[in-house]
Amino acid sequence: MVIRRTLWVGLVMLAAASPAVATVSAPGTAPHSIGLAITGWRVTMASPPDQKVECPDGLVASNLAQFKAQFPDPKDREAWIARYASPWNRGPHGENAAYFPETVQDPLPYHEVKGAAAVGLDLDEGAWGQGPAHPLAHEQFVSPTGEQGIDNQFYRASGCQQGWRKGGEQEEDNQNRIALDPHARILIEIDNVTDETNDPDVTVTIMKGVDRLVKDDAGNFIPFLSQRVDQSLPRYVSRLHGRIVDGVLITDPIEAARLPMVNGSDLRERLMRNFRLKLKLGASGASGVVGGYEDLANLWIWITRPWHAVFEIGGWSAPSYWAALQRLADGYPDPVTGKATAISVGYRVDAVRCFIVSDRGGDFEQPLDVARRAAPPPKVAPSKVATRN
């Protein structure tokens, strides 16, 4: 078992820095590693603008609202429920609207984000149809800090749902799972760091952890605790080249990354292509953005499998949401149909410094492409979704 050089540098920083003083290692420090454990993963901005700015047409209609519009006569609704048991089962033969969204045409319009700001990264640099993602042309956002060309079509499709807004059921449950469930423990190790302010050449490794996070009495995550790597799941190991500029870690994109996650009671994973990070480093943690293109079929599975039972809490309807995601998807177009198979995303993340403990060796450090080939393909949503024309 190996405790990386994150241990000694962490002990030095823990002894030298109080919570009120955010210092990092000085230039010329011997090469060391920085260990981080993700504590927050959010769709929303830290300080989102007024809802009327983002969603001037209002929030999206819920499943129940769509059901009532689909069957205006109360007697027809009662008869439908008597036969098919639930307003979720709105297909022509009682198909579940989440699992078979293309069997239902929602009568009420779907509202997308109309505001100009969003969390994210410039994934395509305006080069439509070029690069590995071959991005389709779309309207871009401006980041909360004023960066232009932000790509986050997932937010455009989801930001007017009550559940994904700040304080919403899906947003907060997703946050709680990231923080509390070890299956969703994402660790980041930054190696070969000689200067935590400016360093042109660092290696970033993303791994799955197994340990829980701990908070103090004030509700803050405690830094510099040990986090063990899950040696049994090399599929969640990704390695990126990066640099630190003015205390901000910026990585080059990689082909793809698989990240563990929990949604509801389901154990799932994200498949993010053209994946990269941008994190502001601090003495006891980091914050910033992860971005890329999420595989649309895989994304739909983790959205709908646990959440179809809480449509009304989240305030959304699957048929119109799926149609919006397909319409706004902007990456990796199918070579035959030309339709995008992935959608740009940007997530606001927070992390706490930790000591990463691992037993490196054997088959653990698989190259990413090997890990992807060895992994079974993600389960695909029902056939009408997966084989859309």
Image (spheres, rainbow, N blue to C red):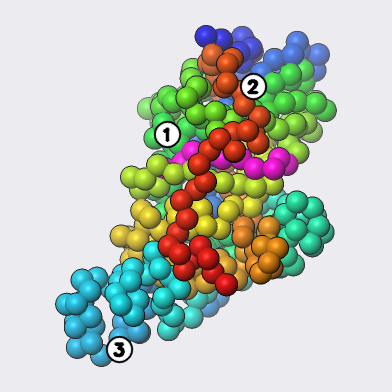
Disc 3 to disc 2, C-alpha distance? 59 Å
What is the residue that sits farthest to the left in this orientation?
A: 82
Rendering quarter of residue 342: bottom right
- Numbered tag placed on residue 34 in the rendering: 2
The residue sitting at 58% across, 16% down in the picture is 362
Q: Is residue 65 magenta?
A: no
**Pointer 1: residues within 10 angstroms few (<14), some, or many (20+)?**
many
Q: Nearer the viewer, residue 90 or 41?
A: 90
- Quick check: marks 3 and 2 in contact, CB under 8 Å? no
Numbered disc in front, either 3 or 2: 3
Q: Nearer the viewer, residue 146 or 110?
A: 110
In the drawing, does residue 12 fall left or right of residue 170?
Answer: right
> What is the three-letter code of the residue carrying label 2?
Ile
Disc 1 to disc 2, C-alpha distance? 22 Å
Q: Is residue 259 magenta?
A: yes
SS label for mark 1? helix
The residue sitting at 48% across, 66% down in the picture is 385
Residue 79, percent from left and from top: 19, 83
> What is the three-letter code of the residue carrying label 1?
His
**Pointer 3: residues within 10 angstroms few (<14), some, or many (20+)?**
few
Q: Which quadrant would the C terminus be assigned to in this image?
A: bottom right
Magenta region, residue range = 253-262
Q: Which residue is mark 3?
A: 72
SS label for mark 3? loop
Q: Which numbered disc, 1 or 2, marks the residue that appears first in the sequence?
A: 2
